[in-house]
Image (cartoon, coloured by chain):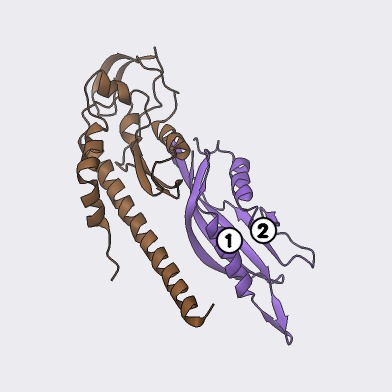
Chain colours: A purple, B brown
Amino acid sequence: MIAGNYNIGDLSKVVRDAMAGVNANIFTSRPETVPAAMSDFIVVSFPTRIYNRLGIGNTTCRISLYARNKVINNITYEDITKLQTMQNAVYAKLPITDTKCLIGNPIPVWGGNDKLGFHCLHIQLDVTIK
Amino acid sequence: MNINEKAIREGRAKFEAMLNERKAMAFITVGNALLNDAELSAEYRNLTGNTLTSLSFGFYENYNLKEFILLENGKPPIRRKLTKGEVVGDFLDYDGNVRSVFKADIDTDGGWGSSTSYQFLSGYKPQQSTSIVITTGTEYSEYLEQELGLNVLTDTRDEARMNGRVMFLNAFKKIK
């Protein structure tokens, strides 16, 4: 592996394929708008630098889970149950083992309200790149 | 499902999660100890450093590679693996010794050793569901052992056979 020469498309595809059973809506960045019927979606990204260790590299993958807010009596609530269900479904897919990369060791990070009608939970994962 | 049954199931799931986590920690502790053993018992000289720096182990759970851990000795290899027939001369090797000339006898993929280690471990199917597998990523490791009689991993394998169980039990943090 040479830093700067790795294929982010391949890495994204590995994660997207692994998450296919978790959610039908998978993006690589937060869409500015989504259809009203879409109640949840996933964003897969590799937001941090790569550490080049010659034969292999290390970086971080972030899987962001978005669940549409619930509105009850004009109060907007976070759909915690949906986020927990999605989190469990992601954890069930780990580790992601591929000839190109190994992805595991999830750490959840609260994402909060995105002000676009969704609450978010980030899951950060260690990535070893061949 | 009555309340008692639900509580028992939840308790059992919690216990199994805790047990799996501690088993994983114990396996990884043993793996690191065996990597250190492999480094200390190495009898070969390092030319590129790929054999030493590709010493690694994979931790498998449910037959899937969950962790890939390389020896951390702080010094990267000086170059990629030499391929068969390649000649290098008048240089400082990985150990800091001056080498006048060296011709490679064994063919390799010409890559980095750690990359080969990962490639092997990611495709390996262990015999046991939960296990660790230690490897090096140089094609000439076997040549070093078979032809030159220099230990690479055989001593570590013997160490694991003799003391692996005790090492695991010592590393296992008991659930109180």
Q: Foreground residue, A20 or B169? A: B169
Count of numbered tags: 2
Can I make out residue A51 in this image?
Answer: no
Q: Which mark is residue A23?
A: 2
Q: Position of residue B144 (x, y in %)?
A: 27, 22
Please name the amino acid that badge 1 sits on.
Ala
Please name the amino acid that badge 2 sits on.
Asn
**Which quadrant holds residue B100?**
top left
Residue drawn at (42%, 69%) of the image: B12
Q: Which mark is residue A89?
A: 1
Q: Foreground residue, A49 or B156? A: B156
Q: CA distance from mark 1 to mark 2?
A: 9 Å
Q: Is residue B118 left or right of residue A83?
A: left
Residue drawn at (38%, 65%) of the image: B18
**Element marked by disc 2:** loop
Residue B16 vs B3, above or below: the answer is above
Quarter of the image with the C terminus of chain B is: bottom left
